[in-house]
Amino acid sequence: METTNNTHPGKFVIAFYLVFTVIAFSSIEIIVNPVRNDIAPFLMNFWRFLVGTIILLPVLLWTSRARIRQLQREDVRDLAVLGCLNILLSMGAHALCIKYARASTAAVLISANPLATNFFAWLILKERMTMRRVFALLLGLSGIIVLTYKADATVDQPFGVAAGVFAMAGFGLYTVLSKRLVHRHGGLMVMVLSCLPALAIYVPLLHFAGVGLWPPAHTWPNILGAGILGTGLGYLAFMKALTFLSAGRCSYLFFFKPPVAMFLAWLLLGEQISVSAITGTVLIMAGILTEIKRAGQTQQSA
C-alpha cells in the first residue's frame, strides 16, 4: 500500500529518488575499487561511514531532535550493538571483499542480503518458512555458488568471496535485529545513532592495528565520493522515497543493484563479465525478486 501524503511530489520525482538511490548504492564498490590497494579496507570503511554520518546527522537533528531525547538507556545500548554488527563486522567484511574481489562481485553479494534477512527472520523472529521462502533461498544460494565456483582466482580471490558472503549474512542479521528499533524510531535515527558508537570504537582499533587514522591524500576523492554519494545522499534519497512508497516497493532497489553495478564496473573499470557471473547474478536476482514479492504479499495479508 502506498503512503498517502498531501504533498505528493508526483511520479517523476519519486522515480528520480529511486533511480538516484540505485545508482548511488551501486557506485560504492565502483568508487572504492581504484584505490583498494592504496588504503587499508577498514580505514576506507571508517572514513566512508564517518563522512556519510556527517551528511546524515544534521538531517536527523533537524527532524528528530525531540525523539532523540526520548531514547531509553536500553535503546542506546541496542543501537551501539547494531552499529558494531553493521559497520565493524558486516561492512568491514564488505570492505575486504572489495579489496580481494571484483567490484561487481562485491556489489552482487551484498545485494543478496534480503535472502539472508529471509533466513534470519525465520531463525530469530520465528517467521513461517513457506515453500516460496525456501525457493527464494535456494535460488539465491545457487546463484552465489555459480558466481563463485568458476570465478577467476586472480580477480575474485576465495578470501574476498568468503568475506562478501559474510558481509551479506551480517547485514541480513543487522536488518532483522534492527526491525524493532526501526519501527519505534525510524530508519534514519537507527542508521545515524548506531554509526556514532561504532565509529568511536573504530578509532582505537585502527590505532592498535597500526593502520593509523589518516588516509593517503590521493584517496580522498574516492573516500568523499563513497561517503557523500553512496552512503549519505543515497540513504537520504532512499528515506525520501520511503515517505511516499511502501518499504516493499522501495526494496526493489536490491533487485536492480546487481545489474547496474555490473554494468558500471564494465563501463568504468573495464571488468570482464563472464557467463558464470551473469548466470549467478540472474539466479540471485530471481531469489531477491521472489523474496520481495513474498514479503509484499505477507504485508498485504496481515
Image (spheres, grey):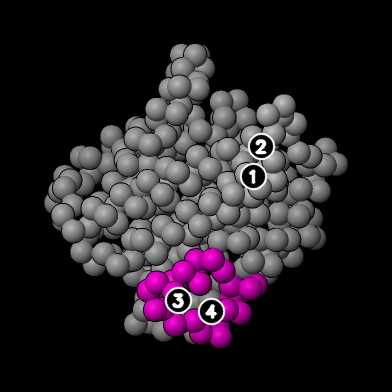
* Circle 2/circle 1 CB separation < 8 Å: yes
* Circle 2/circle 3 CB separation < 8 Å: no
Give the distance between the C-alpha atoms of the residues marked 1 and 4, in whole angstroms. Answer: 31 Å
* Residue at the spot of label 3: 266
Quadrant location of the C terminus in the rendered image: top right
In the rendered image, the residue lying farthest to the right is: 301
Which comes before the other along the chain, label 3 or label 4? 3
Tell me the tag on residue 9.
Answer: 2
Which comes before the other along the chain, label 2 or label 4? 2
Whether residue 270 appears in magenta in the rendering, the answer is yes
Residue 169 lies, with reference to residue 67, above or below; the image says below
* Residue at the spot of label 4: 277
Residue at x 78%, y 60% (from the top left corner): 132
* Circle 1/circle 4 CB separation < 8 Å: no
Q: Amino acid at mark 1?
A: Ile
Which comes before the other along the chain, label 2 or label 1? 2
Whether residue 112 appears in magenta in the rendering, the answer is no
The quarter of the displayed image where residue 291 is located: bottom right
Residue at x 45%, y 76% (from the top left corner): 266
Tell me the tag on residue 14.
Answer: 1
Position in image of residue 55 (x %, y %): 38, 36
Quadrant location of the N terminus in the rendered image: top right
| Depth order, front residue of 38/167 | 38
